[in-house]
Image: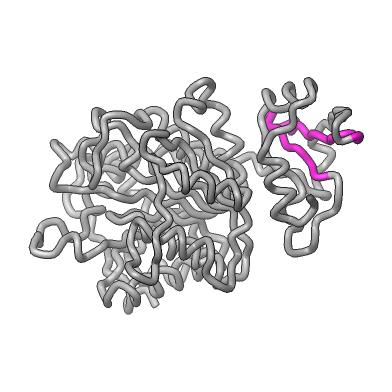
Amino acid sequence: MLKVFLEEFEPGRINGNNDINKLVNRVVFDHDLIENEQFDLYIIAAEDFKQAEGEKNNRFQSNVIRQKLYELVAPWKSVKIADLGNLIDMGEEKNLENLSSILAEVLQKKGTVILLGNAQFFAYAQYLAYVKLQKHVQMVLADEYVKLEDYMERFDNNSYLTKTFISEPNFLFSFSLLGYQSYFLHPKYIDTLEKLSFNTYRLGELRQDFKEAEPIVRDADMLSFNLNSLKSGDALGVNEPTPNGFTGEEACAVCRYAGLSDKLSSISIFEYNKSRDTDAQTAMLAAQMCWYFIEGFYNRKNDYPEKENMDNFIQYMVTNETLDRDIVFWKSKKSGRWWIQHYEEPAEKFSQHKTIPCSYNEYLMACQGEIPEKFFNARKRMGFD
């Protein structure tokens, strides 16, 4: 499958090419070697070729991000990373199908994906990979806004979420919009997300304590990060630059949180535009985001609360007078991270969603009688309320 749908990435000349500590010397690029071995992480890039039409030098723009990534130091003892290369263009519809099939194959092998590209709508192929495996998905999108236009008229960045939300069979368990900016997001789309019991988090809200983003990302199976949501002072090389947004440090923090998540199995970084990228600074930022994801991945704690390992957790009971029952919280002895538990046993298809990641602050809020809204949204999606 690799040779049919993917073109190998050739790293070429990279600073420090002979240094064993550089990431370029810890990654496998040869398809023959990749197909005969199991890896932890798989890097792949997909391109919207319509954008690159007439700009031959801008095809496979994500190669610039790779070049910057592979120049970075790899301080991890054991690294098993494969670069699958670039998706070969076979037309938009076929590209989405091929990409989703490749991603599904990687996920089936328990691999974790880093997906790069110049168009946000490829997140639909990322989601579709889970559908092929019949796995219910929790999706987090880091973006400044969303649009929910009709995908039957035109499938693009403004309509791919509509297709994700309503296409059948549907395996989208939850959706969280991370870091939106109120002046960009139309109220009708906020209303739609609320009616669907999805979660939205304003950038200003997150900045009150950015660590609160960690449990949001920890709850995800897939994260998609739109580079347009970065402030242009930190990242001008994107398709739609804007003066406000995530800082580079915040973006790297989100990616590290994603890497640390024991359940997250794919991350995508989209909307890179090489032609606007002065001195390849945005490519370097995207590379550092990838590096922080890898850093988080190789520091996973494997402490998700399950029957087999509950001895590694401390239980806290919080009485809630409104609900007239106790709410159960769990704190990991290994990482200090927190979860809130549903008080009923969910249906078998939702068995992986018995607990919801939360923060210590949310536990303290519960002690004051305020239960996180995401808890009730999850209950609605499982048919409890």
Q: Residue at x 21, y 48 (%)?
A: 273
Q: Quadrant of the N terminus?
A: bottom left
Magenta includes 14? no
Q: Quadrant of residue 97?
A: bottom left
Side (left or right) of 381 relative to 203? right
Magenta includes 326? yes
Side (left or right) of 38 relative to 308? left
| Depth check, front residue: 156 or 101 | 156
| Depth check, front residue: 283 or 92 | 92
Q: Residue at x 84, y 35 (%)?
A: 327
Above or below: residue 181 compared with residue 2:
above
x, y percent for residue 184: 36, 39
Q: Which residues are magenta?
A: 324-342
Side (left or right) of 243 relative to 372? left
The secondary structure that dominates the magenta segment is strand
x, y percent for residue 116: 34, 54
Q: Quadrant of residue 337?
A: top right
Above or below: residue 37 compared with residue 325:
below
Above or below: residue 8 compared with residue 268:
below
| Depth check, front residue: 246 or 385 | 385
Which colouring convention does the figure follow? Answer: one colour
Q: Residue at x 14, y 37 (%)?
A: 278
- Looking at the rendered structure, the number of numbered marks drawn on it comes to 0
Instruction: Spot the residue most to the front.
Output: 188
x, y percent for residue 289: 38, 39
Above or below: residue 271 compared with residue 31:
above
x, y percent for residue 341: 79, 41
Q: Residue at x 33, y 62 (%)?
A: 156
Side (left or right) of 157 relative to 385? left
